[in-house]
Amino acid sequence: MFPTSTQKTEWTFDNTDALTAKRNEASENYKNVYREVINPGEDERFLSPQDESTMRAIVQEAALKFGDDFQPHLFPSVRYTAFCYFKRFFLKHTVMEYSPKMVMMACYYLATKIDEFYVPIHEFVANLKSGNTETNTSHILKLEPEILKVMDYSLIVYTPYRTIEGIFVEMKQRMALLNFDIESLRPTLIEFITKSLLSDVMLIFSPNYIALAALKYGLDAQDRAVELVNEFLRRMLGVDESQMSEKDNTLVKNIDAQLDQIIAMVEESARPVDADMRKSCMERCTNVSILLSVLEERRRLLPSNKNGANKFDSDED
Amino acid sequence: MRECRKCKSSEYTNKNLIMLINECGHPLCKNCVDNLFARNAAPCEVCGKMLKKNNFWEQVFDDPVIEKENFIRKRIRKIYNLREADFPNLREFNDYLERVETIVMNLIHEEDVDGTEKEIKAFQEAHGEDIERNRKKLGPDELWIQQQIREESAMKARLHDLRSTDEFKVHQDNQNIKEAKEVIKELRDSNVAAGLILDRERKRQIEQELEEREEVERRKKMKKDRKRLDGISFAAHRIAGRAYIHKPVLLELNGPPMPTMEEIESSGYLQWVREPSAHRRAGGFTSAIACYRALLEVRLDLFAVQQKKSIAIDG
């Protein structure tokens, strides 16, 4: 159950600032590794937090499509789980350290296992369009345990899909007098959840909030009254609008405010990365990988550093 | 289960069954060997090889092939006993070891026995001196083993000495002092003649000694019995520790009230949920369970997140 899960205790954060702080910390930690070999001025060439976020967005966009095209057809929850792993991983590491694309693939692979949709590795890599089979296989299998470790083995991810079912059942049961077919909302709701994968809402809100936000978004998108959400909450609480206590009233209002926040966050990140940004980001990535190989070489030559433990470099496709 | 193929007696029918085996690797029970080999030599029942009664030994391994292999290895080892030092380089020594293995395998599986025997004979003639010399002196492996055994037994003896002298001495000393004191006291206090008392004491001492000897014997026997019984236990394993007390886990809903399972079933919730397929229902999965889970997930923590977030917004 969600309240006792690691998803809530370890991987739900207060707000976006907390996420940004964590990401910056990971980035700084990584840069610090090269502190003693870097020449003045060169640290300008590292990716900025903005670049990193663009990089993640590019990979996530591609991964969304990857999930759609995957054969055999995936459960939506597998993709949700994979994205969740991906976001968790890059809270503790930066895209300069690990190739985000390979990490995403490894997350997918791990998610198929955890969500009981196991696809053997050879079938899995057959879905990858770039790279050759052997290197892809070895990269994914090598990353898998690292991801597990970074996530501290918190593997179960609660997704909003079952909550959506619950909302539908509850609405059909308690709000029988609606003048439209509730089922017609379903595609829009699922679409919203899919869009939410590109944002960070799953690291901040619990799955039932995301599902309720989806309901609100769906009602709005189909030109229905969004007040239905509040009505729905009141029905669940078992109170009538006219005789609501002060406490219940603020509760419903607060929840509603949260939903608006979720919808805003999702719409904010749902915008595709524009071509210029993509291009400049790619250039900077190439630049960084050149810089990193130079730095790695310098570090290897340092007399104090005997362990050349070399994680594989960021790549930029 | 072991069974004699001649008389069909097995461990089940004869508790004291002893299986004997000879170099051809065909086991017989002891009774059959006594009967068949009354004249000391006879052909094997199975393969017809001439066997001598004296050459039978008790079968230890269930697989007769292993017994046969052991026998052959013992024999070959006596002839092929060259050491690494007898060869110019490691390569040749390894070739020689390989050859020995081939010979052993040939003999076990009876391939080209004549040729192999000839080879062995030729080898024996060619390296007669080396074999004789190696037979007399021990190789490094044997020396090492012997040393280990020596050290182990020495350690055991030391430990035993230490323990017995320590305990026994203290006990004995105390006992002796006490007894002596008592005798002196009696001699001083009682009216009985001193000679009588001393005689009685001596008699008692002898008796005690006898008793002690018996005690040692008894203990030895007990130890032996215990060893035999140690491997078997019919009782359930007992693990000491505090008894487990079950505390039911309480899941705090922290959300709007949840309808009970009965309400879900009676108040029409189920019409909105897909019926599970027949084989899922057979596995105990009903639509009410699915419905309950979905409804629960809507409610769980609906208040909690709100509490936390409202703080974040206010700040």
Image (spheres, coloured by chain):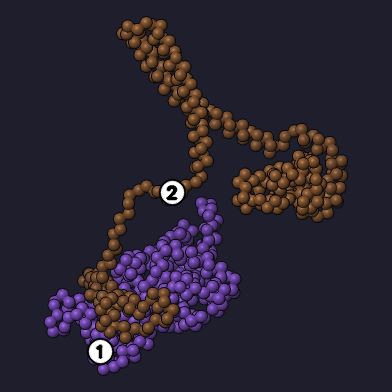
Chain colours: A purple, B brown
Q: Is residue B47 visible?
A: yes
Q: Quadrant of residue B299?
A: bottom left
Q: Quadrant of the C terminus of chain B?
A: bottom left
Q: In terms of depth relative to the viewer, which is nearer, A250 or B29?
A: B29
Residues at badges 2 and 1 in contact (C-beta under 8 Å)?
no
As displayed, is residue B112 above or below residue A238?
A: above
- The residue marked by circle 2 belongs to what chain? B
Of residues B80 and B96, which is closer to you in this image? B80
- Dot 2 and dot 1 within a common chain: no
Above or below: residue A224 compared with residue A63 = below
Residue occupying the point 46% across, 49% down: B234
Q: Position of residue A231 (x, y in %)?
A: 22, 84
Residue indicated by mark 1 = A176
Question: x, y percentage for residue A44?
Answer: 44, 68
Q: Nearer the viewer, mark 2 or mark 1?
A: 2
Callout 1: 10 Å neighbours few (<14), some, many (20+)? few
Residue type, numbered disc 2? Ala
Q: Residue A141 in the image: x percent, y percent?
A: 53, 67
From the viewer's perspective, is residue B37 above or below residue A227?
above
Q: To which residue does mark 2 refer?
A: B235
Mark 2 vs mark 1, CA separation in Å: 64 Å
Q: The residue under label 1 is which amino acid type?
A: Ala
Q: What residue is at 68 percent from the left and 46 percent from the top?
A: B19
Seen at 72% across and 34% down, the residue is B138
> Residue A265 has which mark?
none
Label 1 resides on the chain identified as A
